[in-house]
Every structure is written in structure tokens, then in C-alpha cells.
Image: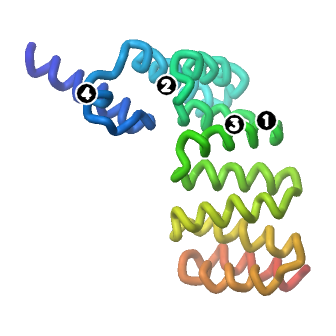
Amino acid sequence: MMRTSVVIVFALLILCVSAGYPQDKDDAENPSPTELEAVEELNKGTDLMFKGEHKKAIEFFKKAIDLNPEFSEAYYNWGICYERLGKHKEAIEMFKKTIELSPDSANAYYALGYAYYQKRKYKQAIDAFENTVRLKPNNAFAFRKLGSAYVKVGKKDKAREQYQVLKELDNQLAEELFREISND
């Protein structure tokens, strides 16, 4: 019985820490009931998101944020849902909030760059993708989109730099970027 309790508490701690909660020892060891409720809402929303039920998922992310306004992962997933629904402007706001709360989130910067790219705001996309590759220098998809955004703003020399890096990371994506640079 004691062993089961220890396993459950350990699993909850891992879930809370991985969900972006502060790494402060006291907070990690003693998540509040509200934080645990927020994680439950996030998980419900994430399940719906993966099933393609983005509108329904958003309601759970809203609940998670109501319970824990500092819950960056809930903002991020909410932004992903907006992106999937074609609501790029709203997605951008969610990704900005995610970055405000988790400034080292390469995924949030990539998602922000992608949303800007979809809105044809290439200069803002470049800034976001630059942050992505700074934080995660092996993200081939970010180098690919960064190169493409440089092509869109007429900076083929910068796009070629991304191509050179991309050749080391992913030949197929490098070739796609090369064709885009050559065809423009």
C-alpha cells in the first residue's frame, strides 16, 4: 500500500515538473490541488487536441489557465489549436504568452514563427525562427522555414546560409530549400 502511494506521488511530481512548473524544491514536492487540477484540465484538452477536436480542447486549456495563469503549456496548446483552426492572429497571441512565461521554449518560438509565416509576416517569422535555432541548433524544420522566410523577403544570401547548415541536419529539407532558392 505504501509503495503504491509513493509511486502515485512520484508520478504526479514528474507530471507537474514536466508541465512547466517552477523547479523550486518546495513547489515540485508539494503541488497545490489547484495546480493538479490545472494539469488534469490540460491533459483532457491535450487528448481532445490529438483527436482533432480543437474547439473543445480550447475550453479545457482555458480552464487550466483559470486555475493556473502561469501555465505556459496550456497557452502553447491553446495556440496550437488556434493554428489548426486557421486563427493565426489568435495563435500568435498564445505563443507570445507562452514565450513570456517560458522564454527558453524553442517549440514556442517555432510555433510563433510558423504562425507569422502563415500570415505572411516574414520579418517577424525570421525573428522567431532565429530564436528557435539559437535555442535548439539541431532543429532542421526551423532552419528550413527560416531559409524560406529569407527567400520571401529577398535575402537569398541568408537563405543560402540556412541551406548550408541544413545540409548537415537533413538532406531532404536542404534540397527543398535549395529548390526554393533556385526557383525564386
Q: Where does label 3 land, which residue?
A: 94
Quadrant position of residue 97:
top right
**Three-letter amino acid code of the residue under disc 2:** Asn
Residue that extends furthest to the left in the rendered view of this protein: 2
Q: Label 1 belongs to which residue?
A: 90
Secondary structure of residue under mark 2: helix
Q: Earlier in the sequence, mark 3 or mark 2?
A: 2
Q: Could you tell which of marks 2 and 1 lies nearer the N-terminus?
A: 2
Q: What residue is rendered at 64% in x and 86% in y?
A: 164
* Label 2 packing within 10 angstroms: few (<14), some (14-19), many (20+): some
Does dot 4 land on a helix, a strand or a loop? helix
Residue where numbered disc 4 is placed: 29
**Mark 2 or mark 1: which is in front?**
1
How many other residues sit within 10 Å of disc 4, few (<14), some (14-19) or many (≥20)? some
Going by the numbered disc 3, the residue's amino acid type is: Met
Q: Nearer the viewer, residue 86 or 154?
A: 154
Circle 3/circle 1 CB separation < 8 Å? yes
Identify the image quadrant of residue 126: bottom right
Of marks 1 and 4, the one in the foreground = 4
Asked if marks 3 and 2 touch (Cβ < 8 Å), the reply is no
Give the amino acid type for the residue marked by disc 1 in the picture: Glu
Residue linked to disc 2:
43
Q: Is residue 58 left or right of residue 19?
A: right
Three-letter code, disc 4: Glu
Q: Is residue 159 above or below residue 21?
A: below
Q: Residue at x 74, y 38 (%)?
A: 93
Q: Which mark is residue 48?
A: none
Question: Disc 4 to disc 2, how far (Cα)?
Answer: 20 Å
In the rendered view, does 144 fall on the left or right side of 119? left
- Where does the N terminus fall, quadrant-wise? top left
